[in-house]
Every structure is written in C-alpha cells, then in structure tokens.
C-alpha cells in the first residue's frame, strides 16, 4: 500500500512535512492506472480523477482550504495554507449517469 501526494506546489509540500504526513510517492501529476487497491492518494484533484482513484479501491484525501478569491492563482506558502485553514478531508466519489442527477426535462443532460 502506497501513499501518494499529488502536488507541484512547494508550500503544500512544506505544509505536509510540518504535519509529519507519511508519503511514499510525491508526484506532480497522477496517472490513476498506477493506483492499487489499498493505496492512499492525497492532493487537490479534479472530481473525475478522484472517482477513478476510488474505483481502483484506493482512499482519497483532499487537501482542503478556505481560499479567498484574492489569494487564488498564485503560489501559497505553508504559513498561508495554515492561515487559510488547510486540512486533510477524506472523500469517496463515484460517477453517476446524467439521468440520475437531472430530473428536469428542460435540462440538456
């Protein structure tokens, strides 16, 4: 079982190190085909990739934070991540058919 941390941001790496997160593989981009059942993936990933991680029997932990609009689009330090309430939260994601999510016949999905 491998723990993956998916990030290209130095501030996130330092933030994780400060918390003593045990990481086996640090990668900038994740190929879900390399994930095995029982693995743990930590990061901020698009929901479709999280669904693939979960489909493969792995656990997904999101690096969540309460980021104001003014702080978006730039690198954040570990201290800034702390200031914006950075935390690890687990999620289970699965795809659903559009018909399962849209009951309005005016909706094109």
Image (spheres, rainbow, N blue to C red):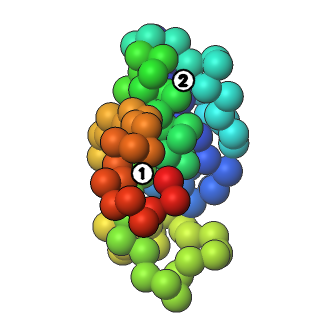
Residue tagged 2: 24
Eyeballing the image, is 38 above or below 95?
Answer: above
Residue 20 is situated, as x and y percent measured from the top left of the image, at: 38, 39
- Front-most of residues 102 and 90: 102
What residue appears at the point 49 percent right and 46 percent down from the top-left corner?
47
| In the displayed structure image, the side of residue 83 where residue 3 appears, left or right | right
* Label 1: element kind: strand
Residue tagged 1: 63
* Label 2: element kind: loop
Q: Quadrant of residue 54?
A: top left
Residue neighbourhood size for the residue with mark 2, other residues' Cα within 10 Å, grouped as few (<14), some (14–19), many (≥20): few
Eyeballing the image, is 24 above or below 82?
Answer: above
Q: Quadrant of the N terminus?
A: top left
Residue 11 is situated, as x and y percent measured from the top left of the image, at: 56, 60
Eyeballing the image, is 81 above or below 97?
Answer: below
Q: What is the number of the mark on residue 106?
A: none
Q: Is residue 81 visible?
A: yes
Q: Quadrant of residue 92?
A: top left
Residue 40 is situated, as x and y percent measured from the top left of the image, at: 43, 25
- Front-most of residues 26 and 102: 102
Q: Nearer the viewer, mark 1 or mark 2?
A: 1
In three-dimensional space, the C-alpha distance between marks 1 and 2, rounded to whole angstroms, equals 17 Å
């Amino acid at each position: 079982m491998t723990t993956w941390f998916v990030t290209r941001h130095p501030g996130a790496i330092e933030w994780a190190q400060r918390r003593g997160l045990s990481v086996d593989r640090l990668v900038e981009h994740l190929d879900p085909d390399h994930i095995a059942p029982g693995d743990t993936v930590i990061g901020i990933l698009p929901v479709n990739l999280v669904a693939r991680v979960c489909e493969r029997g792995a656990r997904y932990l999101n690096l969540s934070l309460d980021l104001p609009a003014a702080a978006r689009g730039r690198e954040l330090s570990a201290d800034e991540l702390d200031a914006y309430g950075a935390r690890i939260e687990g999620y289970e994601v699965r795809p659903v058919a559009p018909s399962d999510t849209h009951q309005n016949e005016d909706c094109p999905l």
